[in-house]
Image: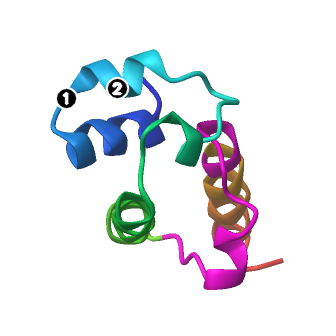
Amino acid sequence: MSTIRELLVELTGTAEYAEAVGDDVDLASSGIDSGDLVRLVLLVEQRLGVEITAEDMESLHTIADYERFVAERSVAGAAGGV
């Protein structure tokens, strides 16, 4: 299970949602409300140490979007922000 899916399990309290939603499915249209999306961002920031701005959130719609974003920021952070 991907890191973002694990955070969705923590957020929803159930693995069924996280396992059922596809990587490229828009989370907002799959039953996650705006409050849950904000909580997901907070979990990503707290657990993974990746800052997500309001501007960043505009381009994060799917699990794949979040995974790519975290991977890119993690690599940039490990490279000293280069």
Residue depicted at 42% across the width and 69% down the height: 38
Q: Quadrant of the N terminus?
A: top left
Could you tell me residue 36's position as x and y percent?
35, 58
Is-magenta flag for residue 14? no
Three-letter code, disc 1 = Thr
* Image position of 34 with respect to 32: above or below: below
Q: Is residue 11 left or right of residue 80?
A: left
| Disc 2: which residue | 17
Residue depicted at 70% across the width and 30% down the height: 24
Residue depicted at 42% across the width and 47% down the height: 32
Q: Residues within 10 Å of mark 2 (few under 14, many from 20)?
A: some
Q: Which mark is residue 14?
A: 1
Q: Nearer the viewer, residue 33 or 43?
A: 33
Residue closest to the far right: 82
Residue depicted at 67% across the width and 57% down the height: 60
Please give the range of residues in magenta: 50-66
Could you tell me residue 52's position as x and y percent?
58, 75
Could you tell me residue 66's position as x and y percent?
61, 50
Q: Residues within 10 Å of mark 1 (few under 14, many from 20)?
A: few
Is-magenta flag for residue 60? yes
